[in-house]
Amino acid sequence: MGLPPRLPDPDAETTGPLLMRVSIILVGRHVTSRPVRRLLGAAVIAALIGGCSSSGSTVSPAAPATAVASSAAAPTTTVARTTTTIAGTTTTTAVAVAPETYAVGRHSVDLVDTSRPTPANGTFPGAPTRTLPTLILYPAAGDPSAPLTEGAAPAEAAYGFPVVIYAHGNNGSPELSLPMLTRLAAAGFVVAAPAFPLSKREAPGGHTAADYRQQPADMRFVLDEVLAGRVGPTPAVDGGRVAVVGHSLGAITVLGLTQNSCCHDDRIKAAVAISGTQAQWDGKWYQPPTTPLLLIHGDHDDVVPFSGSTEVFAAAPSPVGLVRLIDGPHTLYGPPWLDVVAATTIDFLRAELDDDASAEAALAVDGNQPGLATFQQR
């Protein structure tokens, strides 16, 4: 059984400022790399999503690109240690240090996978290839407070920047996800966000979720192109630090890509599933090697219920993280939800990709906001 043909787009809300943090308390345990275990049947998926597929939900248009400033991506505080020696006594003190933030550049590129077809959809007869218009956002040289800039000069990093491949929701697009994607790029990630052939807004024949099983391979193809340097001007990237992030149908895609043997890619070291659940795939779930996973979900989601993530979290081996957004809806890329979604995603990615214990400590702080969010892990 496939997913219902229409899933409301989760990706369009306006941005808001990140929460300010003065300091964090460093905790000792680092999140290790073990995944989540859980499979919801296709009938459950249809019941969860199908009831909302004709709800008539509307999506506000994305803000113009020039209106999204990279300075919106306030950095997570990290912890450095200074050592002082006085009269033979050595004292080590934790000192809060903000990671570097960047201006953000952007460009778009059409990536064409000639190895796989696009199926027929409504009035669309299909195509022998899969065309993936892809938005690239990247750390740029210059003032971090500058607005998002087309073709900005790339920043430099000693070992290259980590990579995030982003999956939009049904009837979504990379442009509608700019508030989230810009924060990731400003935090030091090269982001590649493809528009999926049939689930994107204005897809030929009308947007549909039925093609979701092809989307993990779309993401793998985009990653291939990024690592091969075939996506236009970007900073140098580090192929050993790769993550995937997805929202709604994009989160379902991420779960298939990182947690099912049908699609698993060992290059991916961390995954974030926002407002997601599990669907039918052709392989087996949670076969080693596995991918670390963070779940983020609003507990008042009327499209993909919060239980979609709590079921995953309950069955997961330790450690796994779940951010619950109190009274949070399905659409989370606006205030006040974006603050927590962006901060916890960045914390988690830094913890996993950089083995950064201070980022793990920040995750516990950013995920626990009175009246707004709670965080648990095991």
Image (spheres, rainbow, N blue to C red):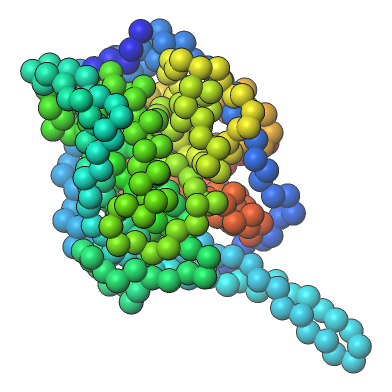
Disc count in the image? 0
Determine the image quadrant of residue 145: bottom left
Is 153 situated above or below 50? below
Rendering coords of residue 18 (x, y %): 41, 59
What residue lies at 40% left-to-right and 7% top-to-bottom? 43
Answer left or right for 280 relative to 51.
right
Residue 139, percent across and down? 37, 65
Q: Residue furthest bottom?
A: 87
In the figure, residue 81 lies in which quadrant? Answer: bottom right
Q: Is residue 38 above or below residue 69?
A: above
Q: Nearer the viewer, residue 44 or 228?
A: 228
**Does residue 8 sit above or below 33 in this rendering?**
above
Residue 374 lies, with reference to residue 252, above or below; the image says below
Identified at 42% across, 41% down, the residue is 245
- Residue at x-position 59% and y-position 56%: 354
In the rendered image, the quadrant that contains the C terminus is top right
Residue with the most extreme front position: 115
Left or right: where 137 falls relative to 370: left
In which quarter of the view is residue 68 placed? Answer: bottom left
Please indicate whether residue 333 sits to the left or right of residue 220 in the image.
left
Q: Quadrant of the N terminus?
A: top left
